[in-house]
Amino acid sequence: MSDQRILEPSREIPVTADYDVVVVGGGMAGVAAAIAAARWAARVCLVERSCALGGMATLGNIAVWLPLCDGRGNQVIAGLAEELLNLSLADLREDMTAAWFRHPPACWRSEGSREDRIQQRYRASFNPSSFLLALEKLLVESGVALMYDARLCSVRTKSDRVTHAIVENKSGRIAIAGTTFIDATGDADLCHAAGEATESLASNVPAAWFYTLIDGELALQKLTRPYDPHGGIDGVSGPYFRGDDGADVTAHLIESRRLLAKRLGEIRAQHPNENVQPILPTMLPNLRMTRRLVGQATVTETDVHHWFDDTIGLSGDWRKAVPVYAIPLRALQATKHANLLAAGRCISASGYAWENLRAIAPCAVTGEAAGTAAAMAVQQTAGDVSAVDVPSLQRQLRSQNVLLDRDLVDAT
C-alpha cells in the first residue's frame, strides 16, 4: 500500500434533516428498529447503503428464519420478529421445498402439542425477492424516511452525544441531525466512527448462497466453507477475511464467487442433459462475524440461562436444543455516547453467543428493543438512553408481544 497522502480541502456540509431516531443500516435489525421507533410516533430516518432492505436476509440470500423456540417446545421470540416472519411468507401459497420457501411446521401455526413442537422447531424460510418488496412497503407505510444508496462516512459528536451522521449519496455529502442514533450496519460502522471501542474478527470464510434453475425448478444452494462457530479458526482451513477492511471485503466476494462457479460446474455435471442456470447470486458479502461494539455488557456463552435485570429480549440456540440467552439492554448501549445504541449482529456479544445472536430472529429482537428504547429516550430523557426507566421499557416491550419471561430462560 502506498504511503502517499493527499489533503482533502475543507468544505461545508449541508444538514438536510433533523430526526428523532436515525437508524444506519437497513438489514433486519435496522428494519425492526425503524418500525418500532415509528410506532412510537418518532420521526425516523433509515440510511441504507444498498438499494433494498433486508440486508443479508434478502440481498445475501440467507433467507432462513432460524428457530424462534428453545427446542424444548417453548417459543422464546415473538414481537416484531414473528410479525416479520409472517410478512416474509405472506404471498407464499404453498411450500417450495427445493427453493427453501417453507412455512413454519403446522404445530407452530396452530395449537400443536408440546411433543410435536419439541420434534419440529419453529423455523421458516422465504423468497428474498418477495420479502424485500414487502419490507419497503411496510416501512414507507410506517412513515419511515428511507435513504437508499447512501453510505455512512463519519459522524459528528458533542460531549457525550452523537449529533450528526454524515453520509454520501448521489447528492453528495450531507449531514443528518438526530436525537438518538442506532447502529444496525452489521459491522459497527457507526460505533467505530464515533470512537466507541469495537472488536473485529479476521476469521470469515468464503460463502455465497445462490439459486439455480434446473429445467424450471428453483433450488437454493447454501454454499459455504466450514467455519468455526466460536469466531476462531480452529479446525478450519482458510483463506480468512475481515469485514472491516475494503480490500478484504472485495477479496471475499471474488473468492466466494469462484466457489460459486465451481459449485455451478459440479451441478451441471450432475445434470448433463438439463439446462442449469444460476439465479440471483448474492449481492452482499456473506460475512458472519465481522466488527462489533464493545458495549456496557458483553453476552458470552457463559451467560446462557442467565437472566439480567435489564433483559430486553430472548434467543434460543439454533444449533441445539435447550440453551436460551437473555439479552441485556447494556449489550446494545455504547459506553461513550448516551444516545447511541447498536442492534443486530454488531451488538456486544462474543464467541458462540455472537454466533447465535447474529441470526435473523435475534437481530429483529435487538432491533425492536433498540428502536423502542431510542423513541422512549427521545420522549422522556432528551435522548439519553441510559436514563430510560428499564422496567418501563420492559413493560412496553411486553405490550408489543416481546417475550420477556424469566421462566423461559431457566435451564430446568
Image (cartoon, rainbow, N blue to C red):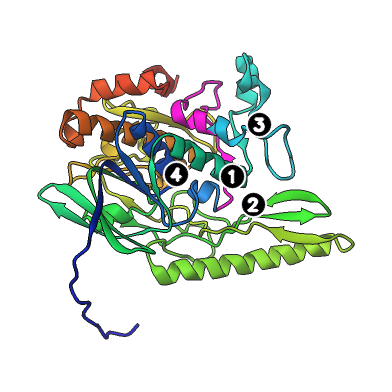
Please tell me how crowded label 3 is: few (under 14), some (14-19), or many (20+) other residues with Cα within 10 Å: many
Kindly identify which residue carries mark 4. 358
Amino acid bearing label 4: Arg
Q: Residue at (55%, 27%) from the top-left corner?
A: 71
Point out the tag, 2 or 1, that comes first from the N-terminus: 1
Residue 140 on the magenta span: no
Please tell me how crowded label 1 is: few (under 14), some (14-19), or many (20+) other residues with Cα within 10 Å: many
In the image, farthest residue toward the left: 159
Point out the tag, 4 or 3, that comes first from the N-terminus: 3
Measure the C-alpha gap from mark 1 to mark 4. Answer: 14 Å
Q: Closer to the camera: disc 3 or disc 2? A: 3
Q: Quadrant of residue 380?
A: top left
Task: Tell me if 143 is positioned left or right of 136 in this view.
Answer: left
Kindly identify which residue carries mark 3. 103
Q: Look at the numbered discs 2 and 1 and tell me whether their residues touch, using CB distance below 8 Å.
A: no
Measure the C-alpha gap from mark 2 to mark 1. Answer: 10 Å
Q: Residue at (54%, 30%) from the top-left corner?
A: 321
Amino acid bearing label 1: Ala
Measure the C-alpha gap from mark 3 to mark 2. Answer: 18 Å
The secondary element bearing badge 2 is classed as loop
Q: Between 266 and 15, which is closer to the camera in this rendering?
A: 15
Task: Name the mark on residue 222.
Answer: 2
Point out the tag, 3 or 2, that comes first from the N-terminus: 3
Kindly identify which residue carries mark 1. 63
- In the rendered image, which quarter contains the C terminus? top left
Q: Look at the numbered discs 1 and 4 and tell me whether their residues touch, using CB distance below 8 Å.
A: no
The magenta stretch spans which residues? 60-84
Q: Position of residue 166 (x, y in %)?
A: 27, 58
